[in-house]
Image: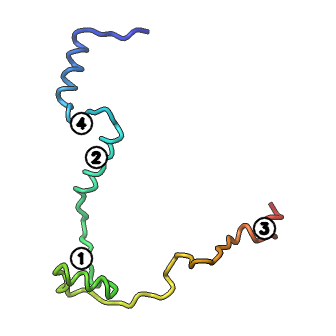
Amino acid sequence: MGRIRTKTVKKAARDIIEKYYTHLGNDFHTNKREKEQERRDNYVPEVSALDQEIIEVDPDTKEMLKLLDFGSLSNLQVTQPTVGMNFKTPRGAVRVCPVIFNKSENKKK
């Protein structure tokens, strides 16, 4: 099967290239990422995160907000950070996966 290369098709192709020249490029994925980033940058949420009745922040965040001149927000509530939320394994500790070391379940399979 050959392709039809008539004058009409060539003119239509030239018109498309002329119209969308800035969008066309050698790397389709780069252009796609740029368009996706533009779409995310232009996103405006329907309800602002600052329109909540109470915004819970830790003391460090409160200090950062003061430095950025947002310390006057009336709905900020300072809470102490919970202890034990560090998900990193301390040095020298061994992580144990319960699925691997549970022998009774492995035998059933």
Q: In the picture provided, is 35 more to the left or to the right than 70?
A: right
Along the viewing direction, whichever of 72 and 84 lies nearer the viewer: 84
The residue tagged 1 is: 50
Classify mark 4: helix, strand or loop.
loop
**Residue 38 place in picture, x, y as percent:** 25, 51
- Nearest to viewer (mark 4 / mark 1): 4
Nearer to us: label 4 or label 3? 4
Judge the density around disc 1: few (<14), some (14-19), many (≥20) Cα neighbours within 10 Å.
few
Q: Compared with residue 25, is residue 10 higher up or lower down, i.e. above or below?
A: above
The residue where tag 4 is placed is 23
**Residue 5 or residue 70, whichever sits in front:** 70
Q: Earlier in the sequence, mark 2 or mark 4?
A: 4
Quarter occupied by the C terminus: bottom right
Q: Are marks 4 and 1 in contact (CB under 8 Å)?
A: no
Residue 34 marker: 2
Q: Residue furthest front?
A: 92
Question: Alpha carbon of mark 1 to alpha carbon of mark 2: how far?
Answer: 29 Å
Looking at the picture, how far across and down is residue 70, in whole percent? 18, 81
